[in-house]
Amino acid sequence: MSRRLLAALCALVVTGAVPVPRAGAGDLAPCPQIIDEKHFADAKALRALNSTVAGFGLRSTGSPAHRRVVDWLEQRVRRMPGFTTKSEELRIQRWQPRGGDIVEAGSLRVAGRQVAVAGAIPYSLSTNGKGPLTYLPMTSPITVENARGKVVLRDFPAVDRGHVAEPELNRDLVDAGLAGAAGLIIAFDFPREQVKGYWDPHTGTHYRVPGVFVGVDEAERLKGSTGAQASVSVHARTDGASTRTLIATLPGKTKERVVIGTNTDGNTWVQENGTAAMLALADYFSGLPMRCRTRTIEFVFATGHLHRSVEGTEHRARILDREYDQGTVAYAMVLEHLGTREIQAAPRANGPGRELRLTGAAEQSAWFVGNQVLGETVIQAVTRRSVQRTFVLPGADAADPARVPQHCSFGGLGTHYQSHLIPAVATISGPWSLWAPSFGASAVDHARMRDQVLAAGDTVLALNGVSRDRIAGDYPAQRQARAAGARTCSHELPPEQAPIRPFG
């Protein structure tokens, strides 16, 4: 990628628009170069699809609700002309809150009194832990000396967006287990009602300590009760289970494939509404004559993103990595967290701490692109569709010139394709509503979502006429360098079991 383009990509904020030409109708009409909006799902239809997915409730990996979502997606796709489906099964050590309700799965008592919680912490130990309450600020690591046998109260990390707190949450849960803590309480500085049902971390690591989230009002009272006897309970079921990635294939003129993916497990209107986008795209492309589908399109509805120790997209990427050199894969595209509205923390109007507020603006989003051809194509598409507050970037991590590829992270699921050196495009955003269900439908602007999905479809159509070699750019050279021993990206997934403390 040239320095000039790299600088342009890193700085680009899309604000303009260009005229949208219209394709003709009928089988003998020219193949469309961009999507004709008259033949694509409108914002109301996308909202209805998104509502259906969110209506299944908590879709934790491998749960009955999650299985029903995947079954429903398969039924929808099978009704579209031309599609065939298959599944890739993965085994997981499943963690499910009893009754499918993560709020009811957690409970807390301090000094004999019940304290309202925002929910159990995902994958925390299903048990009842008792001990004296102690508050440890974030500047104090959780150790055997300060936490063993105690219920530890900890503040939620100070971050602008909740999703970036996952590494610290994971570390605290692992450390609390290693230290022999009786329980862990993570305190938000937001009202409990705003963070009820919060689901993070989503590593899929089974922790060795029970844990709950609380809101700011409860946290203030708890900080005044240090030393009191506390009891943290988590009511969850852990068992072996099977979960599946659904792969829906629409044939094109050649066996060369475009792979479009998202995940199916989630807990909000945002995580994961890429499923609705993919249904809309599948419906549109199935309506085109085969002569207008240069490549076969493979829609990957992946499992395991809420259980990243068995990440379905990573498993799919490993297969595509092996197949890429056979010439059957052109590129991959990932769609996540679409149409999101910006939510910011502000001083609370009535009470301690802060509160989360919709600003009225769109949440910033990013399109990550693997090379110049993909970058130029995406820029044209998002500009045409006026997808504002959008950045086009070469990666979410710092470039490492000694590694192939230089950028490993695409911010989400796209990372798995990019890190396996498959030409990749991925769009993603990360608002507070990603893991906080309380915002419901208000978290998503479905008109904006439609513009993003149209831009994705336009990108696919624009690349129809671009050869696989041009799309590949310098990926083949990087793959050769990797084969020769060059340093590359890590494909290590989080452990499914947290480490055991090395003492009795």
Image (spheres, grey):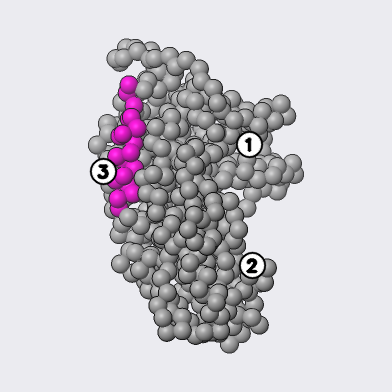
Task: Specify the farthest residue to the front.
Answer: 350
User: Does residue 252 appear in the picture of this structure?
Assistant: yes
Frontmost of labels 2 and 3 is 2
Label the magenta part by its dominant secondary structure: helix
Q: Quadrant of the N terminus?
A: top right
Dot in front, 1 or 3 = 1
Residue at 51%, 55% in the rendered image: 348
* Residue topped by disc 2: 138
The amino acid at mark 2 is Met
Foreground residue among 161 and 75: 161
Furthest residue toward right: 402
Residue 356 or residue 259, whichever sits in front: 356
According to the image, label 3 marks what residue? Answer: 75
Query: Which residue appears farthest toward the bottom when viewing the image?
Result: 504
Residue 351 place in picture, x, y as percent: 49, 61
Verify whether residue 211 appears in magenta. Answer: no
